[in-house]
Image: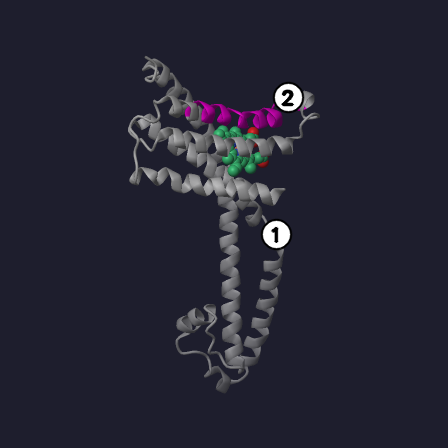
Amino acid sequence: MKNRERFIVSSIFAVLMFGWLGFLLHVSSDFAGSGLGAVFGISGAVLMLVPLVYVFMKRIPFFKEHFIKYVSLQTWLTIHIYTGIVGALLALIHTGHKYNSPLGIALTATMLLVVVTGYVLRYLTPFVNLDMKDKLLLLQTARGDLDSAWGVLEKSAAEKKGLPKAPLLTAGLDSLGLSFASDSPAGQVTTLAVGVADLEYSIRTHELLKRWFARALTAHIVLSVAMYALLAAHIAAGIYFGLRWLP
Ligand code: HEM
């Protein structure tokens, strides 16, 4: 079920991520204001209101108490995701790639960013939150091995001469899997040192990503508040300036 959801949502996500660039090839100056364009716009806006139900269910005790027993929070989250992303797709079609007004551009950009942060939260954050325990354990073992290999090397001046003359180049080639290190103690120290450095780099990158992804929910919430404000202004402007397809 989760795989099917991931596949469907990722496919629509890909269409959205490339779709907005369609203005480079095609712009329709009157589609958004036409009858069909309005159907896409109104359906998109209505669908984009549905994700709010999940927020109410999660945050408002009254809704939690009375409605969760009929439909679980998990199901509401799935509905949140589908309606949010399909709503965004319909809204993007509604634009006809006409990005003329600052309000329209801001609304489209904010909507896409809401989808991007939602996608990150749902499908990418779980990978980053995977335990680092294995990597840390491996690093501890590799450091221990490096210490003992270095201990052997230190005892022999002749062996020390076997250390690479261009350590950076050797480390770079080793990282690419092109190892020229021999089986001698110097070669072992080189290989282990490269392994330890690679692991340390990977752990630091992992921690950095974890910190960045932890901010995804805050970004998703702030952007969705901005999106609803812009959507309200867009609808108000549409009504104020008239529905152009009406006689
Ligand atoms: C119109 C579009 C959307 C709006 C306005 C919206 C809004 C929100 C808000 C306000 C929250 C915070 C809930 C809370 O903690 O109170 C939230 C959570 C979340 N949203 Fe969205 N969202 C939209 C679309 C999406 C999409 C398309 C996805 C996925 C592809 C998504 C995935 C998520 C996830 C995973 C959470 C966190 C759930 C949790 O941990 O409680 N959202 N969304």
Q: Position of residue 120 (x, y in %)?
A: 50, 42
Q: Position of residue 53 (x, y in %)?
A: 57, 25
Residue 63: image tag: 2
Residue in the picture at 64% in, 31% down: 73
Residue 83: image tag: none
Q: Nearer the viewer, mark 1 or mark 2?
A: 2
Residue in the picture at 58% in, 68% down: 142
Question: Residue type at mark 1?
Answer: Asp
Q: How is the image coloured?
A: one colour
The answer to if 46 sits in the magenta stretch is: yes
Which residues, given as a range, are shown in magenta?
A: 41-64
Q: Rounded to the nearest whole Å, what is the CA distance between mark 1 and mark 2?
A: 34 Å
Q: Residue furthest bottom?
A: 158
How many other residues sit within 10 Å of disc 2, few (<14), some (14-19) or many (≥20)? some
Where 6 sits versus 37, above or below?
below
Name the image quarter holding the C terminus: top left
Determine which residue is flagged by label 1: 131
30 on left or right of 197: left
Query: Is residue 142 among what the camera can see?
Result: yes
How many other residues sit within 10 Å of disc 1, few (<14), some (14-19) or many (≥20)? few
Q: Find out whether the residues at labels 1 and 2 contact each other: C-beta distance under 8 Å.
A: no
Residue in the picture at 50% in, 64% down: 198
Q: Position of residue 90 (x, y in %)?
A: 44, 30
Where 83 sits versus 137, above or below?
above
Question: Residue type at mark 2?
Answer: Phe
Q: SS class of the residue under badge 2? A: helix
